[in-house]
Image (spheres, rainbow, N blue to C red):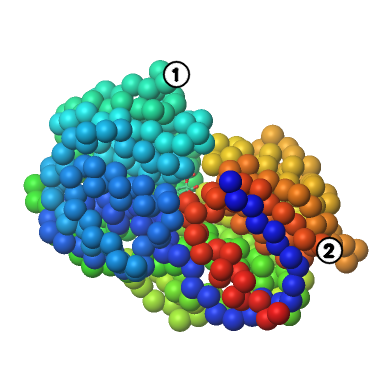
Amino acid sequence: MTSLTITPRGALRGTVAVPGDKSITHRAIILSALAEGRSTITGPCRGEDCLNTARSFRALGIRMDESPDRLEVHGKGLWGLSEPEYPLDCGNSGTGIRLLTGLLAGQDFFTVLTGDESVRRRPMGRVVKPLREMGAVISGRKGGELAPLAVTGRRLRGIAYASPIASAQVKSCLLLAGLYAEGVTRITEPRRSRDHTERLFRFFGIPVQEDGQAVVLQGRPAVGWLGKDLLVPGDLSAAAYFLVGACIVPESEVTILGVGVNPTRTGVLEILTEMGAHIQVANERDEAGEPVADLLVRSAHLRGIRIGAEWIPRMIDEFPILCVAAALAEGETVITGAEELRVKESDRIATMVSELRKMGARVTETPDGLIVQGLGKSGGRLRGAACTSHGDHRVAMALAIAGLTADKPTTIDETDCIETSFPEFYDKLLKSFTK
Ligand code: S3P
């Protein structure tokens, strides 16, 4: 098990590119595998989560050729997958296992899906329950609440489902099942979650409609779709570490190239700007139906903020790094309505409170969020400390950024998990220092 020691040093300055968007990479692999013919995915996320999804498709009979910045997928059409000989291991990826469960529920074969210790603790009932309403036959531990899941493919029927949680994983799982279902699948959620699946469906020419708050899909399309070439935008969730790093380390100035700025994801940009950050969004363009831009960020004096439930889906993965920004800001930050964070790769509310406290941050846990008294005004600093990531990549990277401003080195244990989304994180961080 690896650990990382972060030694505080000079400003962050320079230009960086971040890995391809993880959410879009999973979806690009899936839709390319179901397309007819070859698709080329340029700039995919090469973190373990997406590599596991690619491996799963190989086990489902799809040929994939990899080169350093490219994945060539030889799709076999909507009905072209075949029964894998062994359980599919989705590793640490909640997105991987939930999306694949939906996709595999409507096949005419049997699959077992599993993942690492963290995935096997995460709630699967949120997808298993609506899939069963569609006619799926799925069993698993605790009545299907926990992986491993055994999926016996069945003929599905479309349903109208009002999801109790705003979750793109639930929505996308049901849309993928809906492709194989008889009739219409209609999904509503309390707040809009990221819409990469809908955008990529349209990019490939799969008609998916929006009807007010609902996403609507006609199942079993009469004609399939052809393979396409696409460029994956940089991951805003990975860029967020450099955004906050540049804000909190004095005299920093960083440009992050080609980052996805899909409005269902940009909560972090709006929140940081409201906290006083200097962020410029430049050179906006479009890639495969997704908005992309370069982000320029300079150090700034941050102020505390109130973040309520309405913000959470649009900043869900940026919670750990925003906690770091809040810990160093001037004044109080209150985050509420964030109970979903308790069922991520770790209980992110509990892990961020315990680890930031070790570094001298003034943080109090609440059932659905936290309260931070920022150190900003007193010119206070975080203390270098011995921390752990709790096996959570986003906690590990957030603590590394926090360590940049501490009074002495910070050690973070269990940092192998960074491989799941951002293998080059530390190298890129080192490259952006002036000294
Ligand atoms: C993701 C959706 C989010 C997010 C996860 C990736 C996706 O989960 O936290 O990292 O790609 O669909 P929920 O939408 O389930 O909250």
Q: Is residue 259 above or below residue 168?
A: below
Image position of 417 (left or right of 206): right
Q: Which tag, 1 or 2, sits closer to the chain's start? A: 1
Q: Pick out the residue farthest to the left.
A: 222
In the rendering, at what x and y percent does residue 247 appear? 69, 70
Find disc 2 in the rendering and name its residue: 407
Image position of 217 (left or right of 345): left
Amino acid at circle 2 = Asp
Q: Give me the residue at 51% from left, 64% from top.
A: 424
In the rendering, at what x and y percent does residue 81 appear? 17, 42
So how many labels did they put on this image?
2
The label number, if any, that marks residue 142 in the structure image = 1
Instruction: Using the image as rendered, state which of residue 131 and residue 63 is in the foreground.
Output: 63
Disc 1 from disc 2: Cα separation: 47 Å
Amino acid at circle 1 = Lys
Mark 2: give few (<14), some (14-19) or many (20+) Cα within 10 Å: some
Q: Is residue 308 above or below residue 181?
A: below
In the rendering, at what x and y percent does residue 163 appear? 42, 35
The quadrant in which residue 143 appears is top left
Q: Pick out the residue farthest to the top.
A: 143
Q: Is residue 231 above or below residue 206?
A: below
Judge whether residue 183 can be spotted in this image: no
Q: Give me the residue at 19% from left, 27% from top.
A: 154
The label number, if any, that marks residue 351 in the structure image = none
The quadrant in which residue 418 appears is bottom right
Instruction: Using the image as rendered, state which of residue 327 and residue 310 is in the foreground.
Output: 327
Instruction: Using the image as rendered, state which of residue 320 and residue 406 is in the foreground.
Output: 406
